[in-house]
């Protein structure tokens, strides 16, 4: 008789102990089964491959290079400046910055503006910077190294960065001025557009 009582008491203790432990978990529906897990319950609508592709496009939601146009132009004050160029992107994106590629030397433009160009017409100014001083550490493959010639790991190309905030698929850049007029021209080597590609991944919560 005592053995039956002890067994019953032990069953009650184990039952409530188990229930208390499960209370710290989420009760989730997985098809027809009910499962307990520590993470919140959700079922992604997209598959794992789609998620991996989204992370490649925009890892961790950080700024990435969206578009790049390379050229090699000498901009003379009385012939080419101010210089304007339209940049068409593949899709509408959230643009965070525009980088103008230029020379390692003072042969650089000094006034750079960026405009929205949606609807095939010049719209609102979305960014502007004046570069009236010579910037040394804007060269190299990551545009954060010293500028110098002859070329050493991209040291002869610099990037003048303009912060931008816009959601668009087309912009217009406008370059003007010369850092050192005695050089007779400014060098324009191309443009880089940075931004955040938003790829929505929908989740259904139970």
Image: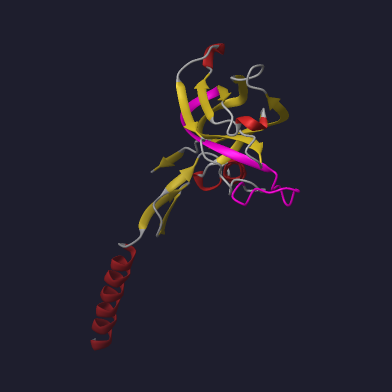
Residue 199 can be seen, yes or no: no
Instruction: Indicate whether 2 appears above or below 34.
Output: below
Considering depth in this image, is 204 or 105 the residue closer to the camera? 105
Q: Say whether residue 40 is left or right of residue 58.
A: left
Determine the residue positioned at 64% across, 31% down. 182
Q: Can residue 26 be seen in this view?
A: yes
What's the residue at 39%, 52% (across, down)?
40
Please state, as top left, top right, bottom left or bottom right, where the N terminus lies in the image.
bottom left
**How far across and how far down the image is residue 164, in percent?**
48, 32
- The residue lying toward the viewer, choosing from 97 and 181, is 181
Where residue 176 sits, quadrant-wise, is top right
In the image: residue 169, left or right of residue 9: right
As for residue 150 lying within the magenta part, the answer is yes
**Magenta includes 16?**
no
114 versus 198 height, above or below: above
Percent x, y for residue 88?
A: 62, 22
Q: Which residue lies furthest to the right in this view?
A: 150
> How far from the left and from the top, in percent, is residue 147?
65, 48
| Region rendered in magenta | 143-169
């Amino acid at each position: 008789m005592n053995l039956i009582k002890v067994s019953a008491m032990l069953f009650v203790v184990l039952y409530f102990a188990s229930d208390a432990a499960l209370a710290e978990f989420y009760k989730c529906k997985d098809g027809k089964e009910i499962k307990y897990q520590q993470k919140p319950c959700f079922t992604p609508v997209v598959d794992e491959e789609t998620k991996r592709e989204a992370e490649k496009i925009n890892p961790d939601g950080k700024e990435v290079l969206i578009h790049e146009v390379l050229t090699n132009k000498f901009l003379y004050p009385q012939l080419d400046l101010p210089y304007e160029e339209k940049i068409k992107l593949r899709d509408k994106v959230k643009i965070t910055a525009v980088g103008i590629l230029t020379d390692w030397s003072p042969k650089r433009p000094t006034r750079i503006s960026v405009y929205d160009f949606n609807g095939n017409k010049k719209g609102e100014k979305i960014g502007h910077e004046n570069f009236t001083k010579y910037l040394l550490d804007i060269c190299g493959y990551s545009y954060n190294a010293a500028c110098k010639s002859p070329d050493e790991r991209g040291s002869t190309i610099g990037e003048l960065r303009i912060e931008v905030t816009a959601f668009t698929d087309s912009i217009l850049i406008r370059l003007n001025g010369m850092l050192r007029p005695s050089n007779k021209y400014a060098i324009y080597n191309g443009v880089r557009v940075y931004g955040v590609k938003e790829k929505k991944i929908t989740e259904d919560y139970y």
